[in-house]
């Protein structure tokens, strides 16, 4: 034992403890700021950080997180935040916060100083990963909006541009190729049976059997053995006929199956036609005046923008609240890093957990204009939800001037193998005064006045998305000052919207992965549709009819070629085989009759022979008895 | 500079009055932080042992330096051993689970494949290191000492200005 070393160690530990007590708060504060700045890419400031190592209590008086895209604004600002770490969990290297209070949280507040970092943090190397379910849903929704037809309503211009020949070339019609391929298939099937009939010649055999049966004269056969031999011969012919009959039956079945398969094209022709028709319409850029599309064109972008925002929250949640996974897969960790293997937790402590956060804040950025005051709880934030066993829940209530203004509920359930995330937002009588609208040439830049009630639900179970937004906006006045209508359609839409006092919207998005169905109904639909129809629906109808007629002509020509071969050849081959079948059946009938006649003759002759023998025996017995 | 100082000091320790046992134990203990990630809790225990036990600290620092230079190259090997022990031996799973749920133990980062793999290798080599180094110290003192002192490189290191300056001032303040 080195006593000097022991004393040195005690002094060293004591010095570390004293220095830690003196400077710990500053170190932690700076450490948190630096770490957060690296993550955010802009200045993060914590004011008045305080801690008690004995009680494991931490907190700060103010936190400002700069918006990296606008460094004179904070993306998040909080007032007093207090939280306490759980000691038994900490000893097990789990960071468990049982209760956390976050006061005066708000977003978009102005900063007193520029929050840009003097040296921007080095950009992290982007690791290319496979797109997840949320990415796919976002891409599918964007695609859904992109593929909406451009509402170009200058019909005169369209008519001038409507050169059907060039449109057909541009549209690259699929129906021609598809019907050509059908024709090829029909021809190949027909050739196959044509070839079959060149080798299938049952006529000679039938004729031979027919001659054989006809040549048998039952009465001309003198004795029974010859009759029996003839029966055997006829039976042989019967076997031959049966084999032939079976072959004919099977061939009939094969012909039917083959031509039935080929005939499937008739079911798809209508769909092919519709696809090509839509393709030409898209190239022609004709306005589609159906009610559903107008609603989507007007508000689709806005709704998708909102859904996309919540999908981003889910994406973040799915990244940081991973779903349950089984045995750890062997990774290739970076040098000196290793791989952390997780074992089952017996105390229900995940590596990181905030059991409950009491939140209060506001949507407005200043005390003078607080907007909606928010109060609520967020529970169960953890990086290992399956260990904690409970989903993350968000419950926020909003108040405006002491009256309920809405609620936001969210459940992020990653406890099981399939993640189930959902949000429900309900906003009542929210002010729309001076609310900017998602940029669109059809919509005003701002709603000058108005109020709205919004009900929105978004649920993402595994890969399945369901979103529904209901909105009723009342007492509306719009500001179109900066939206100069570029064509008649935009002018009409703007005119209709301007004259509306109330707008109702109902939109639903459902689907998974790349397949998304986006429906939207709005009272604008009908109004705009009516006005548009009055303006030029007949002209539009004529133009559409012209395209339809041209496409029908192309389809008819190609379809006729295939149909003619199909119908003629099918009938020819089926008739041919049916004829053979009938002939064989007739022969079989004649053969059976002949066989019966032969059998009867054998029986009669056998009986006659027996009678004769009986009589002979009788005479012999009588003779014997007559003898004295 | 520090490396030269350390080597110089180490050469002196080899021919000093310190017992081969003290030097060999110092070296053997020094291989543990040398082979394993330095920021693991077990290294604090090794540090405490080095301070309070009567072992040679210079040889421990020398071992730490030497092993740190090449330990990172064995990283994939440590990872493979650690993964095998932690994830692929079902009989040990309940033990690791108990350890994972015990206080303090998780702070050792035992569930990290590189920490576990390198620690097991370091512990397995502790006694061989001790024995081998003890043999080396004795052999050095008996047969190699005089020869090595005559090497140009030894003279260069022990006679360097830096070392002389260091030796001149090392006792100042004591």
Image (spheres, helix red, strand yellow):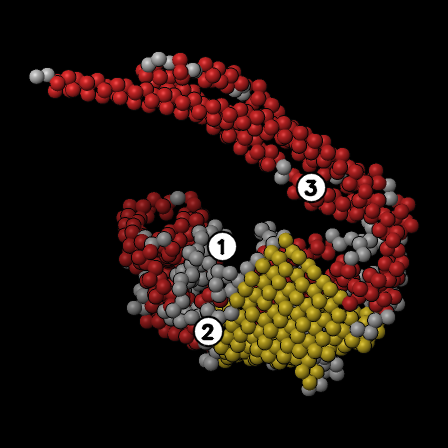
**Residue visible at 51% across and 25% down in the picture:** A586
Judged from the image, the secondary structure of the residue bearing numbered disc 1 is: loop
The residue carrying pointer 1 sits among few (fewer than 14), some (14 to 19) or many (20 or more) residues within 10 Å by Cα, namely few
Q: Nearer the viewer, residue A607 or A552?
A: A607
Disc 1 versus disc 3: nearer the observer? 3
Please indicate whether residue A326 sits to the left or right of residue B145 in the image.
right
Closest to the observer: A276 or A325?
A276
Q: Quadrant of residue A308?
A: bottom right
In the foreground, A460 or A331: A460
Asked which secondary structure carries label 2, the reply is helix
Where residue A21 appears, as percent x and y from the top left, is 50, 78
- Quadrant location, the N terminus of chain A: bottom left
Q: Can you give x and y, in whole percent of width and height, for residue A5 in the image?
A: 36, 69
Q: Residue furthest bottom?
A: A402
Q: Which residue is mark 3?
A: A269
Q: Nearer the viewer, mark 2 or mark 3?
A: 3
Q: Chain of mark 2?
A: A
Q: Is residue B48 left or right of residue A544?
A: left
Q: Identify which residue is drawn at 8% across, 17% down.
A: A628
Q: How many marks?
A: 3
Q: Is residue A334 left or right of residue A286?
A: left
Say which mark, if any, is on residue A422. none
**CA separation, marks 2 and 1?**
28 Å
Where residue A381 appears, as percent x and y from the top left, is 53, 70
Q: Nearer the viewer, mark 2 or mark 1?
A: 2
Pointer 2: what residue?
A: A16
Q: Nearer the viewer, residue A13 or A135?
A: A135
Seen at 68% across and 68% down, the residue is: A469
Q: Which element is circle 3 on?
A: helix
């Amino acid at each position: 034992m080195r006593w000097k070393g022991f004393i040195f160690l005690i002094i060293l530990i004591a010095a570390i403890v004293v220095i830690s007590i003196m400077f710990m708060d500053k170190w932690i504060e700076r450490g948190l700021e630096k770490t957060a700045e690296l993550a955010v890419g802009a200045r993060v400031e914590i004011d008045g950080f305080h801690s008690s190592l004995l009680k494991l209590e931490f907190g700060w008086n103010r936190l400002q997180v700069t918006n990296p895209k606008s460094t004179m604004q904070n993306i998040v600002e909080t007032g007093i935040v207090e939280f306490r770490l759980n000691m038994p969990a900490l000893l097990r290297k789990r960071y468990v916060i049982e209760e956390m209070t976050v006061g005066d949280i708000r977003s978009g507040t102005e900063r007193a100083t520029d929050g840009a970092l003097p040296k921007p943090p080095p950009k992290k190397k982007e690791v290319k990963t496979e797109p997840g379910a949320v990415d796919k849903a976002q891409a599918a929704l964007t695609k859904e909006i992109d593929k909406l037809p451009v509402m170009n309503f200058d019909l005169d211009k369209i008519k001038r541009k409507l050169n059907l020949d060039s449109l057909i070339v541009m549209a690259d019609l699929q129906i021609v190729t598809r019907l050509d391929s059908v024709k090829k298939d029909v021809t190949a099937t027909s050739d196959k049976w044509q070839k079959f009939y060149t080798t299938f010649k049952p006529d000679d055999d039938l004729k031979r059997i027919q001659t054989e049966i006809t040549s048998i004269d039952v009465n001309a056969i003198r004795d029974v053995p010859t009759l029996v031999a003839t029966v055997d011969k006829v039976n042989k012919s019967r076997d031959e006929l049966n084999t032939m009959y079976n072959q004919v039956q099977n061939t009939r079945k094969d012909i039917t199956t083959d031509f039935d398969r080929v005939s499937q094209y008739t079911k798809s022709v209508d769909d092919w036609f519709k696809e090509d028709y839509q393709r030409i319409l898209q190239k022609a850029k004709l306005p589609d005046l159906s009610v559903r599309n107008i609603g989507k064109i007007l508000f689709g972008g806005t709704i998708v923008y909102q859904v996309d925002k919540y999908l981003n929250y889910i994406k973040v949640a799915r990244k940081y609240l991973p779903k349950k996974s089984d045995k750890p897969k062997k990774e290739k960790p970076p040098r000196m890093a290793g791989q952390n293997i997780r074992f089952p937790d017996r105390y229900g402590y995940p590596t990181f957990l905030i059991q409950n956060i009491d939140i209060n804040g506001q949507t407005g950025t200043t005390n003078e204009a607080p907007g909606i005051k928010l109060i609520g709880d967020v529970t169960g934030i953890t990086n290992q939800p399956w260990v904690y066993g409970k989903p993350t829940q968000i419950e926020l209530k909003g108040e405006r001037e002491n009256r309920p203004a809405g609620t936001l509920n969210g459940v992020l359930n990653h406890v099981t193998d399939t993640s189930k995330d959902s949000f429900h937002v309900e906003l009542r009588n929210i002010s729309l005064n001076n609310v900017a609208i998602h940029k669109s040439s059809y919509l005003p830049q701002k709603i000058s006045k108005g109020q709205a009630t919004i009900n929105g639900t978004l649920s993402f179970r595994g890969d399945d998305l369901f979103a529904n937004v209901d909105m009723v906006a009342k007492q509306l006045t719009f500001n179109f000052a900066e939206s100069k209508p570029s064509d008649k359609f935009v002018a009409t839409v703007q005119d209709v919207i301007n004259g509306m006092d109330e707008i109702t919207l109902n939109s639903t998005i459902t689907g998974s992965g790349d397949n998304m169905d986006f429906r939207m109904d709005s009272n604008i639909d009908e109004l705009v549709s009516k006005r548009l129809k009055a303006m030029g629906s007949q002209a539009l109808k004529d133009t559409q009819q012209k395209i339809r007629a041209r496409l029908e002509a192309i389809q008819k020509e190609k379809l006729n070629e295939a149909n003619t071969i199909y119908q003629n050849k099918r009938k020819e081959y089926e008739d041919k085989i049916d004829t053979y079948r009938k002939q064989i059946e007739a022969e079989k009938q004649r053969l059976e009759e002949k066989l019966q006649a032969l059998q009867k003759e054998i029986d009669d002759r056998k009986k006659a022979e027996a009678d004769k023998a009986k009589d002979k025996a009788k005479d012999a017995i009588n003779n014997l008895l007559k003898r004295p | 500079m520090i490396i030269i100082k350390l080597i110089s000091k180490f050469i002196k320790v080899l021919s000093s009055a310190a017992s081969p046992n003290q030097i060999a134990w110092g070296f053997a203990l020094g291989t543990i932080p040398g082979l394993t990630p330095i920021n693991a809790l077990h290294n604090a225990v090794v540090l405490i042992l080095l301070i309070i036990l009567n072992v040679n600290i210079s040889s421990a620092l020398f071992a730490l330096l030497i092993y740190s230079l090449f330990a990172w190259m064995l990283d994939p090997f440590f990872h493979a051993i650690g993964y095998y022990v932690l994830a692929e031996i079902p009989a040990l799973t309940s033990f690791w689970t108990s350890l994972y749920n015990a206080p303090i133990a998780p702070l050792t980062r035992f569930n990290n494949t590189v920490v576990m793999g390198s620690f097991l290798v370091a512990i397995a080599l502790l006694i061989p290191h001790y024995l081998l180094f003890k043999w080396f110290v004795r052999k050095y003192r008996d047969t190699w000492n005089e020869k090595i002192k005559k090497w140009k490189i030894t003279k260069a290191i022990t006679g360097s200005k830096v070392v002389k300056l260091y030796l001149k001032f090392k006792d100042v303040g004591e």
